[in-house]
Amino acid sequence: MAYEAFDTLLQTLDRILKHGDDRAITHSVKQEILSIRVQAVVLQLNLKHYPNKETIRDAAVSTHEIIEYLFSEENLSDGARLANRLRKLAERLESTVGDVVDCIKGKGSIGSVTDSADVSSSSRSAITSSKDDGVVGFEEDVEVIKNRLLERSSRLRVLPIVGTGGIGKTTLAKIVYNHASVVENFDICAWVTISQDHSVERIVLNLLASMKEISTLRDSDIPMETLIYKYLLGRRYLIVMDDMWSKKAWDDVRMLFPDSGNGSWIIVTTRLHDVAAYVNSSSSIHTMSVLDAHHSWNLLEQKVFAGRYFPIELKDIGKKIVQNCGGLPLSIVVVAGLLSKVHTRSSWEQIAANDGQLESIIGSSYTHLPNHLKPCLLYMSGFPEDQEIRVTELVNLWMSEGFVTLSNGSKSLEEEAEDCYEDLVERSLVLVANRKFDGKIKSCSLHDIVREFCIRQAAKEKVILPVIDYLPTPILRRHFVPRLIKDHHSISTTSYDLLHLKDSVHSSHIRTIICIPKKGGRFVGIVEKFSSLRVLHVLRRSDYWDWEPGQVFDLVHLTYLASNIPNNIVPSTILKLQNLQILIIYRSEVRLPVEIWRLRKLRYLIAFSFQPLPSPEWEQNPLDNLEALSLATDLVCSKRMVEMIPNIKKLGICYSKEKFDVNAGYCLDNLNLFCQLEKLKLEMSGGFLSRQLAETRGLNFPLQLRRLTLSGGKLPWNDMTIIGSLPNLEVLKLRNYACKGNYWMTIEGNFRELRFLLIDRSGLVDWITEASHFPRLECLILRRCRVLYRIPRNIGYIPTLKLIEVEKWHMRSLLSSAALIEKMQRNSGNDSFQVRVKHS
């Protein structure tokens, strides 16, 4: 009878979730129902181990009766009250689970939840940034919000943007946030994602990161909250708080924002109307609507064919597909990503047969993915909901997991991996969070609805088990995960949960751990029991997680390690890790042992900075596989060093001395001997480069160099011809007074392949150039060039130029250039040329 009672309860819960009144099934109500369902599944699975089955049966029956009562017609009108009652019911059921678990644990028998494919994750929100920069269907919303932000007011105001998941709240906020007139109106603009599982500390840290001018003070003695408040005080600011899920989240942060009576604004995006009303009790809430048929079709057409001819034979079936999407932008964009890969009518008819529900659309898009892309997508669910995933980390992890293989072409493994995430972005399954200066993707994320699908599918296909999402409460994780992992080789979990896993009999089965660090303490002995571990990726979150050296360096199967290390010292026992290919350390001034030269498979060696590398004098064999080394301090580029790392492709060096020491023997004139080097970063102090040029044979950069970053060093502008003559240089970044002098005149024949130029912090006053001196330039970024008299007028005549990014004080310089005005007018209404004003 007890089993039947739980079957009845679960069927009722499923019926409510699937067919319940949409007015009653708010997000908070759904969350509590899912929580109750998880508890019920766990109790049902462990019935056979619990002696007093009638007690559990009574709990199931009473829960079912209460559910039926709460969802009767007379009780559905008050959503907030309904959610509160369900929460109390879930807490009571969780207490029963605790009693059952404690009893069973005392008997040494705990049931596993691995066979239950219906165990659902908590709903999460991780809309970091929308991929879609288009304004299709949002034109009116953009104008309304933009005009409100530009209104003059004497008080701080809050504007909530509310709407269902996938309707485009973040996209709308991002468009307004980046609008030139909005940027011009505020002294400070900052963006922070709140998410459901928020913490005040993380919100504060993200706010500091967004306000770069004060982010360098985060380690000062002033509390971070006070630092933010004082910095904002007296300034007109715009803060976007994206993806807020609770009133508590607002209460936790509202005191950070002073009201200086100068017209500052806070935008809050949320799905929940009660949260929107709470943050702004007035009637000024911006509620988003689904797209009408016209805008829905325009969005689909733009995404599938990008302005190209839409085949007439596909239009009727295309309109049926877009109608099925119900005007929800995310549904349209995801299905467009699928349609863009198949242009046959039969394929479109199959897609049109879909029921139009967003989950079905995502499932269909997943089904149509090439097999090699499926694990790549599902693996991303192992990252937390609020995490922007660095593409470089993701690519390295995919390669380490064996998801990416070499094709018959000439591409490297890394290029194949880059093609994978570009393909996922094109299919609108992955969002672009940030791009690099040259347009390449820097970080990405999953929309929360896509992420929920991936969590379930990843666990089902055993790609990775996101423990926190799969079992959302600590009591469930503590007692059931040790058994759950027997069927999973890859997990994503917190450092605290690892403490309960390490002594499991199945810990030796785990091959991959993505660890989410939690603050406090050193976790002695946390990983040494995972003897088969090959991939250990600790998320980069301050210094929350640490371990003793012997633990990790005894894991002889490791191929990938990314983490902090204690005391900044890599021990000589790293020699045991002969399979190690990627080593990433989140520390500065890391000391490496001489044994590092004996790790023959090493491909990536990365830290915030390394102490001077130990001499490889006695080592006979080079590190032929090493492709990336950064950031090496005071690296001596001797011929012996070149011989030891002959295939290096990416190299970062920091020269710490204020002045170049000719007796130090850095041998920078040997840089050209790195025959495979494509990307070089040089950080220097004072007049390092000018002294190098004056006292040695000069700078000899490799001719195959494609990307060059110079920071400090004060190379005379006249000597930029050395760099301009590099035949393959595509990206040049000049930071922190990389060049000295106030006059730069370029010459014909230089920078023939340069596509991107950044000048950040410079004393340059006058820049004389011609359009023909940068024949392929696509992007020009000028930052902190406060004494630059004007932007060269001839820049506007460069035919390939797509973007100029400047700070506010250079806008007048832009508008004084007839060529640039002409270019802006000529390209008005399309994306072929943009002027972007950087947030202060």
Image (cartoon, helix red, strand yellow):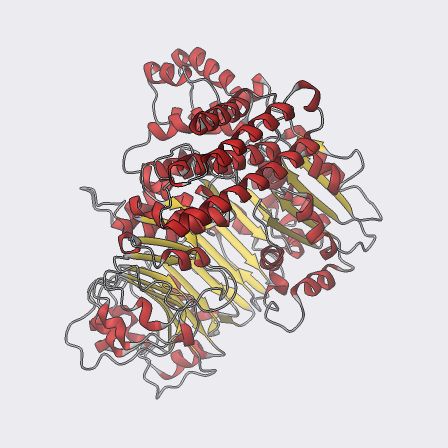
Q: Quadrant of the N terminus?
A: top left
User: Residue 170's spot in the image, x, y percent?
Assistant: 59, 39
Q: Is residue 715 visible?
A: yes
Number of marks in the image?
Answer: 0
Q: Nearer the viewer, residue 666 or 815?
A: 666
In the figure, is residue 541 to the left or right of 671?
right
In the image, residue 456 above or below residue 533: above
Q: Is residue 788 visible?
A: no
Q: Nearer the viewer, residue 388 or 773?
A: 388
User: Residue 17's spot in the image, x, y percent?
Assistant: 53, 25
User: Residue 699's spot in the image, x, y percent?
Assistant: 34, 73
In the figure, is residue 220 to the left or right of 741?
right
**Figure quadrant of residue 372:** top left
Which residue extends farthest bottom?
663
Q: Nearer the viewer, residue 593 or 527?
A: 527
**Residue drawn at (29%, 52%), measured in percent from left and top?**
506
**Residue drawn at (32%, 84%), measured in percent from left and top?**
665
In the image, residue 714 above or below residue 485: below
In the figure, is residue 611 to the left or right of 203?
left
Q: Nearer the viewer, residue 529 or 129?
A: 529
In the figure, is residue 597 to the left or right of 135?
left
Q: Quadrant of the C terminus?
A: bottom right
User: Residue 154's spot in the image, x, y percent?
Assistant: 85, 48
